[in-house]
Image (cartoon, rainbow, N blue to C red):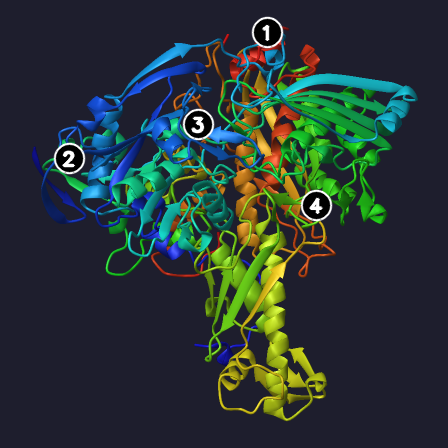
């Protein structure tokens, strides 16, 4: 059936059931490890057991003698092809396979290609590597000590472990505001290292066609087009001879943005053997070597008047980037968007300084739905506001309400230069308080305290800047962050939209079909969405930083409107009217004042492909393409309230309730939006209470399996209580703002604030995540521990 | 060694290495890629299939241990072109996002409803607590299983909301 029979001009938005579910429910998804190619070989990576060591020798003879091994690739092999090092997304370099040294436990040392999965693993045991151990730096706070071992002696001129110093805001104005303040509160806090841990690990299948010279890489990538360009730059292959296919992706959360050594090893493997090579890492490899998140050591200072007017904010940050600076973010911002750390408040001044350092830990830093480190900024400001409330003896909700930006202040330029587009913050906070029954919760808390029970209520209010980003300000390795979209309308009126971003579970095949259907009076079922294959889609930077709806979604709207304008000219010819006499109504072009005279997109599409005589200068067909360069970021926000019960005898925390009010502008598919929020809230509970990638003093990773790196299950998560306000984004063509990371950014600090609130009568002022029973108990004893270091 | 097992009602005899894991046998030897491998340590449950009538984590079962036994995977949930109510519930209540954990979740949910047709939300959470989902925060998975339970109790294909 086509749209002609069932125009649905206003029916396309809403909780449409997902198109992609049909295959997943039947076990018919196609994830990278599901791909089989004729003659396919299997790769496996030998990894360093040591965190810092000189590589003296690598002996591959025994592995090569294995009857089912076809190739063993080492750093030396790659050096001959000038592929031993690759550029990172932060303009550093990273070893593909180690040549001189290994710099973190789990670093890639050799790659075996064998006829089957198990033999490849067997052969790893046959490789002999001689290491000369070196002193190790695992604690960022010691990385710049005089005499600390220099990790990156491969970099010319590098004499220490310093990467960068970066600052934002007005130091003098901030100093002045602090000097004039009645009250200053300070706190050191660690946002510890965590890992996104998508349920599908990273992997690739690489296949080089020896006749055409075309390289196809099926890979777990959130950014297939950016990867194609990077492969071309790294391997020296002509870019048009590279095809990246990102098939179904089993969760990304930022973990699948970088190019990993394993992908390149699979590529070299197919070049050497002439056969397709599959490489899929195991869980330990994923946790130990791929992009981690956070590891921010923060010092916060907040200044206020005695009556609770917040004046200024300061932050000093030590950022642990691991052994290679591989943070994935717009190149101009080495600390990502951390400097939106002024949050949702009307401050006079703010200043932050960030110093990045190398340690003998896995590289990464920007991952895990952090909106380019806004997660860290929100954590800092929302902890500081709670500490200030405690200092002033004010209710934390009241303090926030007094200081939130007011609706009439938008567009608002914050003290570090971001222009917030729109919002009604007090309304969102009030709604969250209403949903929670805030006064009743405080009454219950008082009653329980009188009985010696420790219940806590924690709030957070966050503002994100997402949808990177304006080309003038934002690029990744020189690639501007604009997204293309192509839309074809077939003669019978069904449509195919090709987009550059890549779903990892966000439901793009459904949401983007709804966008186009809404603009053209079609049904979502009449719109097919093509994505994830660089040979079939226009260029764009991919899906991370909540940018799909703000950037590619806007591109889909713009291209659909281009189609609509083309259709207007054709409809005018069909109706023998002037184009300017037509109006778009009820999902069709009709003659103004004569609504009986109208044509649907399907009718117009057939005519556009027919022999109908079109006005001079008008092309046939309705197809269109566009590139969308966002004028600004979009600024979703939300108010969260978490209720916990804490047992001070054991330190155990139970999350009883979690209320989340999100404003992400116009919601195209509210069912999908709420699903995104649910997932992010679980992330927040996990980060706050369980998740940490810790290391011992020798640099051994202590979070290398799901036995050690604990993730929340269905029993740690409460039944989420959601609310919404809708403040349309003024510069997005349909007013949407993006929501993919909101809950992950906003929720961890609500949980921490709740736990501290519960235990304040026992003298607790702050405790670092994760608030495991042991860590809470230690903090209560006045002996807080560094959860990211082995005791 | 030679093993014979009945997978989704079809008997398969294969020569395998004694160390071959059941998940790899299903995926690589039989091409049943609906069951996924996620962790190696029996924590995530992406690999859950039924061995005879019991859900197991097939990353920690040797293929040889299934010799002479019956295995049921996600590919066998729909019967005669009709989705199982559990599958319908996941679609109706948005119980999946990336879809990677979904087959394992649904196999456990099917087992739960066969033995406990009307589980409370807390009982569903307990039953699924040995499996991980990184996308949904579990809420809609619980609603999906409740939907299936109510749908089966009503015995009809009505438009029940989540």
- Give the Cα separation between the discs numbered 4 and 2: 58 Å
> Which circle, 4 or 3, is nearer the viewer?
4
User: Where does label 3 land, which residue?
Assistant: A289
- Give the Cα separation between the discs numbered 1 and 3: 27 Å
Under circle 2, the secondary element is helix
Q: Position of residue A354 (x, y in %)?
A: 69, 25
- Mark 3, chain letter? A
Q: Position of residue A107 (x, y in %)?
A: 42, 24
User: Where does label 1 land, which residue?
Assistant: A147
Q: In the figure, is residue B152 to the left or right of B17? A: right
- Give the Cα separation between the discs numbered 1 and 4: 38 Å
Q: In the figure, is residue A560 to the left or right of A128? A: right
Same chain? Circles 2 and 1: no
Residue A191: which quarter of the image?
top right
- Give the Cα separation between the discs numbered 3 and 2: 34 Å
User: Where does label 2 land, which residue?
Assistant: B66
- Give the Cα separation between the discs numbered 4 and 3: 31 Å
First along the sequence among labels 1 and 4: 1
Image marks 2 and 1: residues in contact by CB distance under 8 Å: no
Same chain? Circles 1 and 3: yes
Image marks 4 and 2: residues in contact by CB distance under 8 Å: no
- Mark 2, chain letter? B
Q: Position of residue A646 (x, y in %)?
A: 58, 19
């Amino acid at each position: 059936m086509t749209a002609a029979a069932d125009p649905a001009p206003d029916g396309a938005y809403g909780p449409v059931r997902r198109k992609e579910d049909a295959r997943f429910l039947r076990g018919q998804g196609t994830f990278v490890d599901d791909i089989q190619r004729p003659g396919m070989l299997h790769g496996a990576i030998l990894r360093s057991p040591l965190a810092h060591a000189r590589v003296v020798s690598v002996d591959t003879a025994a592995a090569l003698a294995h009857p089912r091994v076809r190739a063993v690739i080492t750093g030396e092999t790659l050096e001959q092809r000038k592929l031993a090092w690759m550029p990172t997304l932060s303009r550093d370099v990273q070893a593909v396979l180690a040549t001189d040294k290994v710099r973190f436990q789990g670093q890639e040392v050799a790659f075996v290609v064998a006829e089957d999965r198990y033999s490849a693993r067997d052969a790893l045991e046959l490789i002999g590597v001689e290491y000369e151990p070196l002193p190790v730096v695992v604690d960022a706070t010691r990385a710049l000590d005089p005499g600390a071992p220099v990790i990156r002696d491969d970099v010319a001129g590098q004499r220490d472990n310093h990467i960068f110093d970066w600052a934002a805001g007005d130091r003098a104005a901030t100093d002045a505001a602090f000097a004039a303040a009645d009250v200053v509160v300070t706190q050191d806090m660690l946002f510890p290292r965590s890992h996104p841990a998508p349920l599908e690990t990273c992997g690739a299948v690489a296949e080089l066609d020896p006749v055409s010279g075309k390289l196809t890489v099926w890979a777990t990538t959130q950014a297939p087009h950016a990867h194609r360009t990077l492969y071309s730059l790294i391997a020296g292959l002509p870019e048009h001879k590279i095809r990246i296919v990102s098939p179904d992706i089993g969760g990304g959360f930022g973990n699948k943005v970088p190019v990993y050594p394993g992908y390149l090893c699979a590529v070299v493997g197919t070049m050497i053997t002439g056969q397709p090579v599959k490489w899929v890492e195991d869980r330990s490899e994923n946790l130990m070597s791929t992009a981690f998140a956070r590891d921010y050591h923060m010092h916060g200072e907040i200044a206020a008047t005695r009556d609770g007017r917040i004046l200024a904010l300061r932050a000093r940050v030590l950022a642990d980037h691991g052994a290679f600076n591989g943070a994935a973010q717009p190149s101009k911002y080495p600390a990502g968007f951390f400097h939106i750390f002024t949050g949702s408040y009307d401050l006079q001044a703010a200043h932050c300084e960030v110093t990045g350092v190398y340690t003998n830990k896995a590289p990464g830093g920007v991952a895990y739905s952090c909106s380019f480190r806004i997660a860290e900024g929100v954590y800092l400001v929302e902890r500081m506001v709670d500490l200030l409330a405690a200092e002033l003896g004010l209710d934390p909700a009241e303090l926030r309400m007094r200081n939130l930006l007011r609706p009439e202040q938008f567009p608002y330029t914050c003290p570090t230069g971001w222009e917030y587009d729109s919002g009604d913050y007090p309304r969102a906070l009030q709604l969250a308080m209403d949903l929670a029954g805030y006064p009743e919760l405080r009454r219950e808390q008082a009653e329980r305290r009188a009985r010696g029970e420790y219940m806590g209520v924690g709030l957070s209010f966050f503002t994100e800047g997402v949808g990177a980003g304006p080309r003038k300000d934002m690029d990744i390795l020189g690639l501007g962050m604009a997204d293309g979209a192509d839309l074809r309308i077939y003669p019978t009126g069904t449509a195919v939209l090709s987009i550059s971003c890549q779903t990892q579970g966000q439901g793009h095949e459904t949401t983007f079909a709804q966008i186009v259907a809404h603009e053209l009076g079609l049904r979502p079922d009449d719109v097919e969405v093509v994505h994830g294959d660089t040979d079939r889609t226009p260029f764009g930077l991919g899906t991370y930083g909540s940018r799909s709806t703000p950037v590619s979604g806007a591109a889909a709207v713009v291209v659909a409107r281009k189609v609509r304008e083309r259709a207007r000219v054709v409809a005018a010819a069909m109706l023998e009217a002037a184009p300017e006499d037509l109006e778009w109504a009820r999902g069709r072009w009709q003659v103004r004042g004569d609504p009986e005279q109208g044509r649907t997109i399907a009718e117009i599409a057939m005519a556009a492909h027919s022999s109908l005589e079109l006005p001079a200068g008008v092309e046939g067909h309705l197809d269109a393409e566009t590139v969308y360069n966002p004028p600004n970021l979009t600024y979703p926000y939300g108010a969260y309230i978490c209720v916990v019960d804490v047992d001070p005898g054991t330190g155990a925390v139970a999350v009883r309730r979690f209320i989340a009010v999100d404003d992400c502008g116009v919601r195209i598919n509210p069912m999908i939006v709420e699903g995104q929020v649910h997932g992010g809230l679980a992330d927040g509970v996990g980060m706050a209470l369980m998740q940490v990638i810790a290391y011992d003093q020798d640099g051994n990773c202590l979070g290398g399996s799901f036995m050690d790196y604990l993730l929340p299950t269905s029993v740690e998560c409460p039944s989420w209580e959601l609310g919404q306000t809708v403040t349309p984004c003024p510069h997005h063509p349909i007013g949407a703002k993006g929501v993919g990371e909101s809950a992950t950014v906003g929720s961890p600090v609500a949980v921490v604030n709740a736990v501290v609130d519960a235990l304040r009568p026992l003298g607790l002022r702050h405790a670092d995540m994760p608030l495991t029973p042991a860590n809470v108990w230690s903090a209560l004893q006045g002996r807080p521990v560094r959860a990211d270091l082995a005791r | 060694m030679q093993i014979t097992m009945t997978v989704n009602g079809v008997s398969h005899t294969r020569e395998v290495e004694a160390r071959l894991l059941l998940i790899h046998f299903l995926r690589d030897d039989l091409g049943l890629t609906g069951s996924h491998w996620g962790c190696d340590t029996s924590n995530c449950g992406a690999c859950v299939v039924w061995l005879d009538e019991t859900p197991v984590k097939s990353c920690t079962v040797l293929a040889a241990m299934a010799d002479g036994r019956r295995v049921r995977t996600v590919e066998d949930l729909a019967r005669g072109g009709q989705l199982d109510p559990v599958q319908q519930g996941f679609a109706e209540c948005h119980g999946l996002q990336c879809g990677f954990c979904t087959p394992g979740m649904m196999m456990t949910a099917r087992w739960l409803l066969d033995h406990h047709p009307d589980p409370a939300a807390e009982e569903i959470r307990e039953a699924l607590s040995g499996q991980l989902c990184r996308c949904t925060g579990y809420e809609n998975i619980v609603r999906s299983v409740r939907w299936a339970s109510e749908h089966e109790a009503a015995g009809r294909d009505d438009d029940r909301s989540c």
